[in-house]
Image (spheres, rainbow, N blue to C red):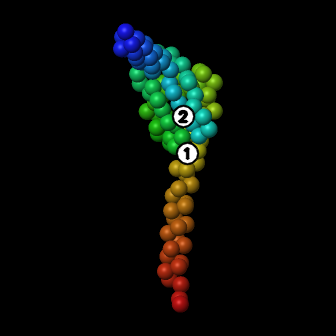
Amino acid sequence: MRRLIAVVFGAMLGGGLVFAAFEYHLVRTDETYHLVPKKQAGLTDAYVDIRDWPASQWNEHTTLAENMIAAGHGDLVGGSIASGLLNDIISPFQQDASEATQRWWNSKPE
Protein backbone atom coordinates (compact mmCIF):
# COMPACT_ATOMS: atom_id res chain seq x y z
CA MET A 1 0.00 0.00 0.00
CA ARG A 2 2.87 2.40 0.80
CA ARG A 3 4.39 1.86 -2.62
CA LEU A 4 1.10 2.62 -4.31
CA ILE A 5 0.75 5.85 -2.34
CA ALA A 6 4.36 6.80 -3.23
CA VAL A 7 3.69 6.14 -6.93
CA VAL A 8 0.48 8.17 -6.89
CA PHE A 9 2.20 11.01 -5.02
CA GLY A 10 5.12 10.97 -7.48
CA ALA A 11 2.78 11.01 -10.47
CA MET A 12 0.81 13.92 -9.02
CA LEU A 13 4.00 15.85 -8.22
CA GLY A 14 5.42 15.21 -11.69
CA GLY A 15 2.15 16.20 -13.33
CA GLY A 16 2.05 19.41 -11.32
CA LEU A 17 5.61 20.30 -12.33
CA VAL A 18 4.88 19.64 -16.01
CA PHE A 19 1.72 21.77 -15.76
CA ALA A 20 3.74 24.59 -14.17
CA ALA A 21 6.40 24.33 -16.90
CA PHE A 22 3.68 24.61 -19.58
CA GLU A 23 1.99 27.62 -17.96
CA TYR A 24 4.83 29.67 -16.42
CA HIS A 25 8.37 30.90 -17.07
CA LEU A 26 10.71 30.61 -14.09
CA VAL A 27 13.05 33.57 -14.59
CA ARG A 28 16.23 34.03 -12.56
CA THR A 29 17.51 37.57 -12.13
CA ASP A 30 20.37 39.06 -10.12
CA GLU A 31 18.25 39.47 -7.00
CA THR A 32 15.51 36.84 -7.13
CA TYR A 33 13.36 34.45 -9.15
CA HIS A 34 10.15 35.49 -10.94
CA LEU A 35 7.25 33.28 -11.96
CA VAL A 36 5.90 34.80 -15.19
CA PRO A 37 2.65 33.48 -16.72
CA LYS A 38 2.80 32.44 -20.37
CA LYS A 39 0.23 33.72 -22.86
CA GLN A 40 0.41 30.46 -24.82
CA ALA A 41 1.12 27.11 -23.17
CA GLY A 42 4.32 25.34 -24.16
CA LEU A 43 7.61 24.07 -22.82
CA THR A 44 9.75 26.80 -24.40
CA ASP A 45 11.70 28.89 -21.90
CA ALA A 46 10.37 27.06 -18.85
CA TYR A 47 13.50 28.09 -16.89
CA VAL A 48 15.56 31.09 -17.97
CA ASP A 49 18.58 32.75 -16.35
CA ILE A 50 18.67 36.34 -17.63
CA ARG A 51 21.48 37.67 -15.44
CA ASP A 52 24.01 38.18 -18.24
CA TRP A 53 21.81 38.40 -21.33
CA PRO A 54 22.86 40.78 -24.09
CA ALA A 55 20.30 42.46 -26.36
CA SER A 56 20.81 39.81 -29.05
CA GLN A 57 19.64 37.10 -26.64
CA TRP A 58 16.33 38.93 -26.11
CA ASN A 59 15.81 38.94 -29.89
CA GLU A 60 15.86 35.13 -29.80
CA HIS A 61 13.29 35.01 -26.95
CA THR A 62 10.66 37.52 -28.01
CA THR A 63 7.74 35.63 -26.44
CA LEU A 64 9.53 35.62 -23.09
CA ALA A 65 10.11 39.37 -23.38
CA GLU A 66 6.44 39.95 -24.25
CA ASN A 67 5.27 37.80 -21.34
CA MET A 68 7.60 39.57 -18.90
CA ILE A 69 6.39 42.99 -20.03
CA ALA A 70 2.76 41.86 -19.72
CA ALA A 71 3.48 40.60 -16.19
CA GLY A 72 4.96 43.95 -15.15
CA HIS A 73 8.64 42.99 -15.35
CA GLY A 74 9.45 45.14 -18.37
CA ASP A 75 12.17 46.94 -16.44
CA LEU A 76 14.18 43.70 -16.38
CA VAL A 77 13.92 43.37 -20.15
CA GLY A 78 14.74 47.02 -20.84
CA GLY A 79 17.53 47.15 -18.27
CA SER A 80 19.19 44.08 -19.72
CA ILE A 81 18.96 45.45 -23.24
CA ALA A 82 20.30 48.85 -22.17
CA SER A 83 23.24 47.39 -20.27
CA GLY A 84 24.01 45.07 -23.18
CA LEU A 85 24.01 47.96 -25.64
CA LEU A 86 26.17 50.02 -23.30
CA ASN A 87 28.66 47.17 -23.03
CA ASP A 88 28.68 46.81 -26.84
CA ILE A 89 29.49 50.51 -27.17
CA ILE A 90 32.12 50.70 -24.42
CA SER A 91 34.00 47.40 -24.93
CA PRO A 92 35.90 48.44 -28.12
CA PHE A 93 37.16 51.55 -26.32
CA GLN A 94 38.24 49.51 -23.33
CA GLN A 95 40.16 47.14 -25.61
CA ASP A 96 41.82 50.05 -27.42
CA ALA A 97 42.78 51.67 -24.11
CA SER A 98 44.28 48.45 -22.73
CA GLU A 99 46.24 47.89 -25.96
CA ALA A 100 47.53 51.48 -25.88
CA THR A 101 48.56 51.08 -22.25
CA GLN A 102 50.35 47.83 -23.06
CA ARG A 103 52.20 49.48 -25.98
CA TRP A 104 53.21 52.38 -23.74
CA TRP A 105 54.59 50.06 -21.06
CA ASN A 106 56.49 48.04 -23.65
CA SER A 107 58.01 51.12 -25.34
CA LYS A 108 58.98 52.82 -22.08
CA PRO A 109 62.81 53.20 -21.79
CA GLU A 110 64.36 51.56 -18.78
Q: Work out whether residue 23 or residue 16 is closer to the camera in this orientation and state it.
A: 16
Q: Position of residue 16 (x, y in %)?
A: 46, 15
For marks 1 and 2, give the one nearer the viewer. Answer: 2
**Image quadrant occupied by the N terminus:** top left
Q: Work out whether residue 92 or residue 37 is closer to the camera in this orientation and state it.
A: 37
Amino acid type, mark 1: Leu
Local secondary structure at mark 1 = helix
Amino acid type, mark 2: Arg
Residue 37, located in which quarter of the rendered image? top right
**Any mark on residue 85, and which?**
1
Residue at coordinates 63% horizontally, 24% vertically from top-left? 72
Residue at coordinates 55% horizontally, 60% vertically from top-left? 93
Q: Where is residue 18 in the image (x, y as percent from the top left)?
A: 42, 18
| In the image, farthest residue toward the front | 1
Report if residue 77 is visible in the image.
no
Report if residue 34 is visible in the image.
yes
Q: Which of marks 1 and 2 is nearer the N terminus?
A: 2
Crowd rating for badge 1 (residues with CA inside 10 Å; few <14, some 14–19, many 20+): some
Q: Where is residue 104 in the image (x, y as percent from the top left)?
A: 53, 78
On screen, residue 60 above or below 70: below
On screen, residue 63 above or below 51: above
**Residue underneath mark 2:** 28
Crowd rating for badge 2 (residues with CA inside 10 Å; few <14, some 14–19, many 20+): some
3D distance between C-alphas at marks 1 and 2: 21 Å
Q: Work out whether residue 89 or residue 15 is closer to the camera in this orientation and state it.
A: 15
Residue at coordinates 50% horizontally, 74% vertically from top-left? 102
Residue 84, located in which quarter of the rendered image? top right
Local secondary structure at mark 2 = strand
Q: Where is residue 57 in the image (x, y as percent from the top left)?
A: 46, 37
